[in-house]
Image (cartoon, grey):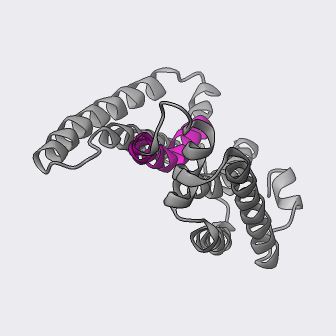
């Protein structure tokens, strides 16, 4: 129905508004976050560096995982539980093939973090899962995007670009986090998150996004 399509469209907009900056922040602050939370005692700088690669790969997949949670109920609401399972199996198999080929290539090239390929494969499988779910909803005319997507895409692009630029500019190098104390790490990390969140919402407001757009499905 039209109402369901509008609700799905609104949920998709809301998820992207939240997940895009979250993924960027998780990607760019992977090292500082791991240092602040775990680099104590036996968990040293090299462990942070190696773990950072995996966390960066999973940050990329955060959007894909979230989109699956949005699109799958579009099938369940129509009593179709088989299609999401079939699509999930296809995505899982594709992810396994990517993992096998990617790890083999990484070992051949002697890359220092082949384990990150496994995280990347999981993220790519999530995107494939979401893409196939979306294609099915579009083909069945269950979901019809509203006309405001081009404008929202520009608004989101500018706001997330501002977040990325700000974090790249303000975040200290990883060597600083290795040497800093727990208080300095936590305060700096909290400050970076707060400033980037403020910049994100300010950029959205300047580009024309208003709170009423987030409170209800748009017609």
Q: Percent position (x, y) of residue 21?
A: 64, 58
Q: Percent position (x, y) of residue 89?
A: 36, 26
Give left or right: position of 46 versus 38.
left
Nearer the observer, 40 or 145: 40
Q: Which residue extends farthest bottom?
A: 206
Nearer the observer, 137 or 128: 128
Q: Which quarter of the rendered picture does the N terminus lie within? A: top right
Q: Is residue 185 magenta?
A: no
Task: Say whether residue 165 is visible.
Answer: yes
Task: Say whether residue 141 is visible.
Answer: no
Q: Percent position (x, y) of residue 208?
A: 80, 75
Q: Is residue 86 above or below residue 32?
A: above
Q: Is residue 202 above or below residue 97?
A: below
For image coordinates 36% across by 34% down, the residue present is 91
Nearer the observer, 51 or 132: 51
Magenta-colored span: 46-71
Q: Is residue 86 above or below residue 97?
A: above
Give left or right: position of 112 versus 210.
left
Q: Which quarter of the rendered picture does the C terminus lie within? A: bottom right
For image coordinates 57% across by 70% down, the residue present is 168
Nearer the observer, 145 or 182: 182
Q: Is residue 65 magenta?
A: yes
Quadrant in the picture for residue 194: bottom right
Quadrant in the picture for residue 198: bottom right
Quadrant in the picture for residue 188: bottom right
């Amino acid at each position: 129905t039209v109402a369901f399509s509008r609700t799905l469209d609104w949920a998709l907009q809301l998820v992207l508004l939240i997940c895009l900056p979250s993924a960027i922040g998780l990607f760019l602050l992977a090292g500082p976050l791991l240092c602040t939370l775990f680099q104590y005692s036996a968990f040293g700088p090299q462990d942070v560096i190696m773990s950072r690669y995996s966390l960066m790969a999973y940050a990329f997949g955060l959007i894909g995982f979230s989109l699956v949670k949005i699109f799958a109920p579009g099938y369940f609401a129509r009593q179709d539980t088989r299609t999401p399972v079939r699509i999930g199996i296809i995505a899982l198999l594709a992810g396994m093939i990517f993992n096998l080929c990617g790890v083999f290539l990484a070992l051949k090239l002697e890359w220092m973090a082949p384990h990150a390929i496994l995280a990347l494969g999981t993220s790519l499988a999530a995107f494939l899962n979401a893409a196939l779910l979306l294609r099915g909803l579009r083909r069945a005319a269950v979901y019809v995007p509203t006309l405001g997507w081009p404008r929202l895409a520009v608004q989101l692009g500018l706001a997330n670009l501002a977040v990325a630029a700000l974090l790249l500019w303000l975040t200290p190098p990883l060597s600083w986090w290795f040497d800093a104390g727990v208080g300095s790490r936590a305060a700096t990390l909290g400050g970076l998150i707060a400033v980037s969140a403020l910049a994100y919402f300010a950029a959205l407001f300047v580009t024309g996004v208003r709170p009423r757009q987030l409170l209800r499905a748009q017609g």
